[in-house]
Image: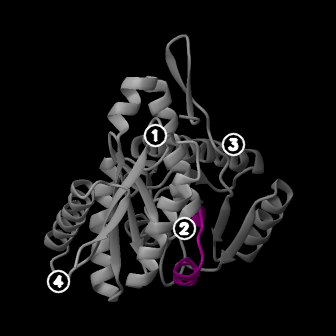
Amino acid sequence: MDLASYVNGVPFIKLEEEPQKILIVDDDASIRELLAQFLDRKGFAHADAENGRKALDLLEHHSFTIIITDLIMPQIDGLELLKIVKQSWPETDVLVMTGFTKNFSYTDVIYAGASDFIQKPFSLDEIEAKLKRVIRERQLRHALKRLSVRDGLTDLYNRRYFDQKLQEEAARAIRQKYPLFLVMIDLDRFKELNDEYGHQEGDRILNVLAKVLKTSTRKNVDLAFRFGGDEFAVLIPYASQNQAEAIAQRIRTNFLKKDVKSVTLSMGLAKLGQGDDADALSHQLVTHADQALYTAKKEGGDKLVVKE
């Protein structure tokens, strides 16, 4: 995988840059202005709110990676804001600051989910040091999460993540009443290719298909997975039957344009059924797509079969 390499046998994880957007929350306008000027100089995108209520309004409509909040504020104080943020936006880091340490301890805010505690009056050097540490920790968490959900060879999402996303997408499709399709894909004559040309060539073919899946599906809409071995899967939400079939056929056509020897694709397409039980319906969706795939294989492969 391109994210991790090995140095003397030890995994070395490369950290990816993440654009930061910071929300300043303080009822003191001078503090908000001071921090805004500091963040401008450091090149961070930012916004500000004068209390927890306005901060929550901003969070409902905008994404923030880090919040710097005072504790003592009207309407919703910093500790309550922190608890709401960690419940509703758990990936957002929160730096808490206050001049009233007798009312709140470091332990209180850390247990509530804060990434760090800043005592007023503070220096901008301290703010910068704490921000740098939080950003580095965010990068590391992101890298480790990516490693946990990606297939090591193809960099597609792995089977573990498929199980998670299938449940999420099925529940969302039921709740929002939109169609959800699943395409199961199997490489025809892949074992014979490995036997004749070796596993390195087999790995190359798997990566060819992975790249075709990425370029033949809708970016930030469809989700492609390595299901296991030479089997792949694609979740297709927000699409009609004709659109889902067109996506599946585009994958097959684009794959066959590549140098893939005698390997072709068998594909099974199924649609999420009606009902309210996301767990049962997602299990049924996989079963139906598998049945369609089995039919395609049984009929000689190199075709798409749609489960009626």
**Mark 4: few/some/many CA within 10 Å (<14, 14-19, 20+):** few
Question: Badge 2 is on which residue?
Answer: 220
Question: Badge 3 is on which residue?
Answer: 129
> Does the magenta-highlighted stretch encompass residue 145?
no
Q: Amino acid at mark 1?
A: Leu
State whether residue 182 appears in this view: yes
**Mark 3: few/some/many CA within 10 Å (<14, 14-19, 20+):** few
Going from the N terminus, do you reach mark 4 or mark 2 first?
2
Looking at the image, is 19 positioned above or below residue 51? above
Quarter of the rendering occupied by the C terminus: bottom left
Residue 177, located in which quarter of the rendered image?
Answer: bottom left
Separation of residues labelled 4 and 3 (CA atoms):
49 Å
Which label number is shown at residue 276? 4
Separation of residues labelled 3 and 2 (CA atoms):
34 Å
Residue 290, located in which quarter of the rendered image?
Answer: bottom left
Q: Nearer the viewer, residue 296 or 35?
A: 296
Element on which disc 1 rests? helix
298 relative to 140 in the view: left or right: left
Separation of residues labelled 2 and 1 (CA atoms):
19 Å
Separation of residues labelled 1 and 3 (CA atoms):
27 Å
Pointer 4 and pointer 2: residues touching (CB < 8 Å)? no
Most extreme residue toward the top, as rendered? 8
Where residue 42 sits in the image (x, y, percent)?
81, 54
Please give the range of residues in magenta.
53-69
Identity of the residue drawn at 50% across and 17% down: 10
Element on which disc 4 rests? loop
Question: Badge 1 is on which residue?
Answer: 147
